[in-house]
Image (cartoon, rainbow, N blue to C red):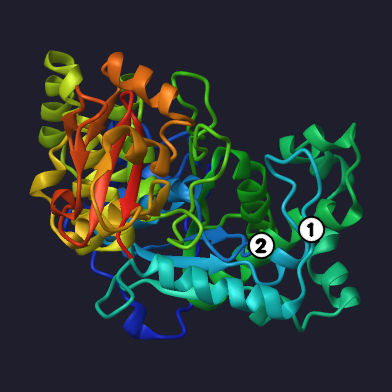
Amino acid sequence: MERSEASLSRPDDTMTLLAAGPDGPLSGLLDDLRWRGLVDATTSGLEERLASGRPIAAYNGFDPTGSSLHVGHLIPVFGLVRLQRHGVRPVALVGGATGMVGDPSGRSAERVLLDRDAVDANAAAIRVQLERFLDFSSGPARAEMANNLDWLGSVGLLDFLRDIGKHFTIPYMLAKDSVQVRLSGGLSFTEFSYMLLQSADFLHLYREHGVELQAGGADQWGNITAGIELIRRVEGGAEGHVGAHGLAYPLLLSASGAKFGKSESGDSIWLDPTRTSPYRFYQYWLDVDDRDVGVHLRWFTLFDRATVESLEAERDGRPEARAAQRALARDITERVHGTAVGDEVARVSAILFGGDPAHADAAILRAVSREIPTAPWPGAGRHAAIDLAIAAGAATSRGDARRLVAQGGLAINGRPVTDPAAEMDEDALLPGGFLLLRKGKRDYRMLVRG
C-alpha cells in the first residue's frame, strides 16, 4: 500500500522528535525489527518515510477490558519500546471507548462489555504497567498516553455515520479477515463497527497529534489498513495521497504448539503480581523451550545482536545449563517487577531447582514459602523424619513415609533422609523458622514455626 506524505499540522512544537535514539537512526529501524523477526507486514511507503530521517510518531492500541496486561501484550509493548529507542515518539492508546465495544480480531466469541468506571480503572492500571517499559518523562521522543474515550465519547451517532461511516462500503468491511472468521458463528453490529472506531482513532491521532504510523499485531492488519484508507479519503485531497503508514508484528506461536502467554495449566501469565506471582512469572520464562528461546530473546529483551547470538551458542553447546532461559527470565522479570524482585525470585528458583537452602536467608525462605504448600511446625520436642513428612503433607501415613525414605525420595533442608527414625528438633530449622522438605525431584513442602 503506497502512500505519499501529507503535510501535518502539529499543535505543539515541543512534540518534535530527534531522528535517532539509543538503537540508531530511523533508517535502521526496520532492519532491526526484521533481524528480530518482528515484521509481518508494512505499508509500501514506510521504509522510504523512515529513510527520510524526518521525525515520526507511532501508536499502538491496548484494550482495557482487564486491569492488567498479560505477556501476550508484550509483543506490541516491546514494539513501542524499539520504536522509541530509534527516536520515534510512541503513543500508547488505551481504548476507553472501544473497550466498551470489543474488538472481534482474533476472537471466536464476543467480549463482555464494560461500564465507564471499570474501563477508567483498567486504563489507569495499564498506564502504571506501561511506565515500566516506556519513557514518559521528558525529551523529544517521550511517550504519551491517550484514551479514545476523550474524543469518541462525545461523538453522536448521526455525526459518526456522516463523518466516518460514509467512507466505508459493506463489501470492503466484509472482506477483512477479522470479520470473515466471525461471520459463521455470529457477529454483532457492535463488534462489526469496531473497525470504524479504530479508523476514527487513527484519523484523530493523525490530525491532532501528528501520528503517521499505526502498529499492531498481524490480526490487526485489516483495522490498520482501514484507518489508512479513511485518512486517505478524508485528508488526501483530490489525488488521495496521504502520509499514513502501518506496521504489523507477527503473532507468536511456540515451536511446541502451545499458545503464547499461557502457563502449562492454561492460565494467562499477567504482569500484575497479585494475579501472577513474580516467581510464577519468572518460571514461565525459565521454562521456555530451547527451540523458542532465541525468538524470545529477540522479542522480549533489549539485548543486542552479539549478546543474543552468544546466548544461543551457549544454548546449543550446553542446553542443560539453560543460560539463555535464565538470562531471558531475569531480564524480563526485572523490567516488569523491579531489580530487587528479580533478584529474589531468581534465588527462590535456584533453591527449588537444586540449590542449597542452608545458604538462604530468612527473607528468601519466606519468599519460597509463598510459592509452595506450607504447614505449621509440630511444636516443641524432637520429631522423627517420617512424622515431619506427614505433617508437611509429603506422606499420608508412617508406612507411606517409610517407603518414601527407602526409595530415596525424601530430602530435608536439601539433605537426603536415609533413616526414617532420625529425629529433629528446632535446631534443624533454617533462618526464620523454616524446614524445607522435598518429595521426589520437584514436590516441595515447608514447615513453618509460628
Residue density around tag 2, few if under 14, some if 14–19, many if 20 or more, within 10 Å: many
Pick whichever, 262 or 368, lies toward us: 368
Q: Mark 1 and mark 2 in contact (Cβ < 8 Å)?
A: yes
Question: Badge 1, how many Cα within 10 Å: few under 14, some, many 20+?
Answer: few
Q: Quadrant of the N terminus?
A: top right
Q: Is residue 32 left or right of residue 241?
A: left
Amino acid type at mark 1:
Val
Q: Position of residue 197 (x, y in %)?
A: 73, 63
* Marks 2 and 1, how far apart at CA: 8 Å
Query: Compared with residue 8, is residue 35 higher up or lower down, i.e. above or below?
Result: above
Q: Nearer the viewer, residue 27 or 95?
A: 95
Please tell me which residue lies in front, 291 or 193. 291
Instruction: Left or right? Give the position of 284 relative to 420.
Output: right
Q: Is residue 159 visible?
A: yes
Q: Is residue 83 visible?
A: no
Viewer-proximal residue among 102 and 12: 102
The quarter of the rendered structure image containing the C terminus is bottom left
Task: Write the residue at 18% across / 43% down.
Answer: 303
Q: What's the amino acid at mark 2?
A: Thr
Residue occupying the point 28% across, 32% down: 35
- The residue depicted at 43 percent of the width and 23 percent of the height is 400
Q: Position of residue 210 (x, y in %)?
A: 47, 71
Mark 2 lies on a secondary structure that is loop
Looking at the image, is mark 2 or mark 1 earlier in the sequence?
A: 2
Q: Is residue 122 above or below residue 58?
A: below
Can you identify the residue that label 1 sits on? Answer: 112
The residue to which callout 2 is attached is 65
The residue at 54%/67% (across/down) is: 93
Q: Secondary structure at mark 1?
A: loop
